[in-house]
Amino acid sequence: MNVLKTLLCAIYARVSTNKQDNGNQLIQLREFAAKQGWTIVAEYVDTVSGSGKKDRAQFDAMMLAASQKKFDVLLFWKLDRLSREGVRKTLRYLEQLDSYGVAWRSFTEPFFDSCGIMRDVVISIMATLAEQERITISDRTKAGLQRARKAGKRLGGKPIHVDMSEVQRRRATGESLRAIARSLNVSPSLLVKKAKIQA
């Protein structure tokens, strides 16, 4: 007996309001699940509007249901339909599903299949890509900061100027540091820090 025939399946889809093939996507996912002998227990569909708003309420609901073991396998159209947040975050989602004991399968990418023999290879490749993505982001950030410095831009927040002689005068009259800080719209710790620097 094929164990897969007893699996409970959830479908996740991310569709666009302005595309004609949304219905076809869901139909094909349902047909595929039926051919595997999986019982569909839930469908989670996030709709991406033309405004570009990234509301992922259904994705969050799906991950919660996965953590509660409400289904055994997650079926999605394509990996970039599951997540477009980069390789690292996508890998994290797949690892989360694994930790919940939930298998996953990409309809259009058979190699993205936690049930298949290529699972460990795929995870290894994704982990390598995730590390490369981290290095690339870090390099871009460093290069951007270097360009900004060369252009004479000041990095970080604007320095806050406080007249410490005024603070000392007010402290001498018995006013609390908290009250002075509140009137200057700064934190008491900033005044303490500036006082230490001047000392």
Image (cartoon, helix red, strand yellow):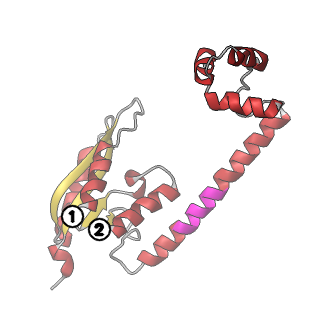
Image coordinates of residue 63 in percent, x first then y, are 31, 55
Residue 145 or residue 177, whichever sits in front: 177
Q: Are marks 1 and 2 in contact (CB under 8 Å)?
A: yes
Helix, strand, or loop for circle 2?
Answer: loop
Q: Tell me: 198 left or right of 16.
A: right
Q: Could you say which disc has been placed on residue 102 in the image?
A: 2
Q: Label 1, on which residue?
A: 71
Residue name at image x 82 percent, y 32 percent: 199
Horizontal placement of 87 versus 42: left or right?
right
Answer above or below: position of 11 versus 142.
below
Part of the protein shown in magenta: 127-135
> Badge 1, how many Cα within 10 Å: few under 14, some, many 20+?
many
Element type where label 1 sits in the image: loop
Examine the image and state in which quarter residue 166 appears. Answer: top right
Mark 1 or mark 2, which has the lower sequence index? 1
* Secondary structure mostly taken by the magenta-highlighted segment of the chain: helix
Query: Residue at left 15%, top 86%?
Result: 1
Q: Residue at x 53, y 70 (%)?
A: 125
Q: Nearer the viewer, residue 23 or 190?
A: 190
The amino acid pointed to by label 2 is Val
Q: Is residue 157 visible?
A: no
Percent of width and height locating residue 103: 31, 69
